[in-house]
Every structure is written in structure tokens, then in C-alpha cells.
Image (spheres, rainbow, N blue to C red):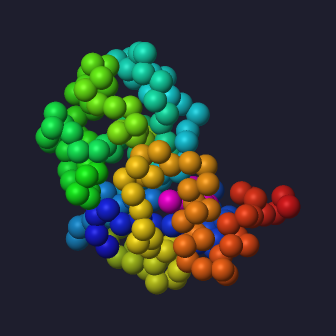
Amino acid sequence: MNKGKILVSNFTLLNDLEFNKSVIIIVKDDEEATIGFILNKKSKYIISDLNESCKGLDLSIYEGGPVAMDSLHFIHKKCKFLNDSIKITDDLYWGMNFKLAVELLKKDKINKNDIKFFLGYSGWEKNQLRGELDENSWFLSKNFKTKDILETSNVFWKNKINEFGEYYKIWSNSPDNPNLN
């Protein structure tokens, strides 16, 4: 698995509250663990709700995953001011300096559409994700644009799962909880 890969949850995860209809970007993958952020699950919070220094910023926070739900993370487009960020793709980075990012947002040095915040993250131990991929719990999407990742709409999972063929179209229209159907 490489950084920048996009995981799309299979319909087999419909009963998994955390990963049902999830699209995840992988931001770290090494011999110890894999880390990613759920891109399409907006939380009930905005950034100013969780951090005093963010007053006046009304940016949404997304549920990054079930691990370390008390931690804030962010990804952003390439920015000359955030040079300690970790490269994910050619133009997408995992930010490391939250305080500086907030200052730059307040000074309009970063466009609000070029950054996305997460509460918590998704994590897998060594070989755990490989096993889940082998079980077809996840698919790897080959097509994405940075703009789509930063602006994810409420139909992002539906669009991504449809990339994998006609068989999945019925699942793309299923309710979040099929047992309530």
C-alpha cells in the first residue's frame, strides 16, 4: 500500500458503523502501521468548536476514523508556508503544524477550499489492511483528483463504488442502514 491510495469500503461493511460507505485516503504506510483519514463523513463540529485559537473559522471537521478521537489532523494542497508537512501525493500533504495552518487561514494565505480537518484517524497494524483488502472489504480507487478529496460531497462513496462496475450500483443506492429498509 502506498501513500495517496484511496480506499473505498465494500458494501460488506454496511454493518460497520465506522466504515460503512467510507472513502479513505492513506497518508502513512510503513512496516509498523498504516494510517488514513475518512474523507466523506462530516462531523457535527466546525473547527472553532474544538479549538479556542480558531474563533471565526467555520470550517467543517470530518471524522477521520475511530483512533485517537481527541486528536486533530489536517491535509492540504501544496503550500509554500507549510513546509514541514508530509507529502501524500504530488499536490496533497498531511499537515504537521496546526497552529501555523490556523494563522495562515486567518490571514487568507491558505484558501479554505485547500485544507480539510479531521478528528481522529483510521489505523491498521502491520498486514491488517492487506488482510482486509484480500477479504474484499475495501477496493482501491485509481481515479481521484485533489479537488474531490478536499471538497468531498455526500455522494462521494456512491460515485467511487460505481467505478467498480454494474454489480455495485444496487449497493450505491442502498440506505445507510439496510435493516431499516
Residue in the image at 73% along x and 73% along y: 170
Q: Name the quadrant of the N terminus.
A: bottom left
* 156 inside magenta stretch: no
Q: Nearer the viewer, residue 146 or 96?
A: 146
**Horizontal and vertical percent position of residue 78:** 23, 45
Q: What kind of secondary structure does the magenta stretch mostly adopt? A: loop
Q: Is residue 120 something one can see in this rendering?
A: no
Q: Name the quadrant of the C terminus.
A: bottom right
Image position of 125 with respect to 64: above or below: below
The answer to whether residue 162 is left or right of residue 82 is right
Q: Nearer the viewer, residue 126 or 85?
A: 85
**Horizontal and vertical percent position of residue 163:** 55, 73
Q: Which residues are magenta?
A: 18-23
* 21 inside magenta stretch: yes
Q: Nearer the viewer, residue 150 or 181?
A: 150
Outermost residue toward the bottom in this view:
134
**Horizontal and vertical percent position of residue 127:** 35, 76
**Horizontal and vertical percent position of residue 107:** 27, 19
The answer to whether residue 162 is left or right of residue 152 is right
Which picture quadrant has residue 157? Answer: bottom right
Q: Is residue 14 something one can see in this rendering?
A: yes
Residue in the image at 14% along x and 42% along y: 84
Q: Nearer the viewer, residue 43 or 142?
A: 142
Which picture quadrant has residue 141? Answer: bottom left
Number of residue marks: 0
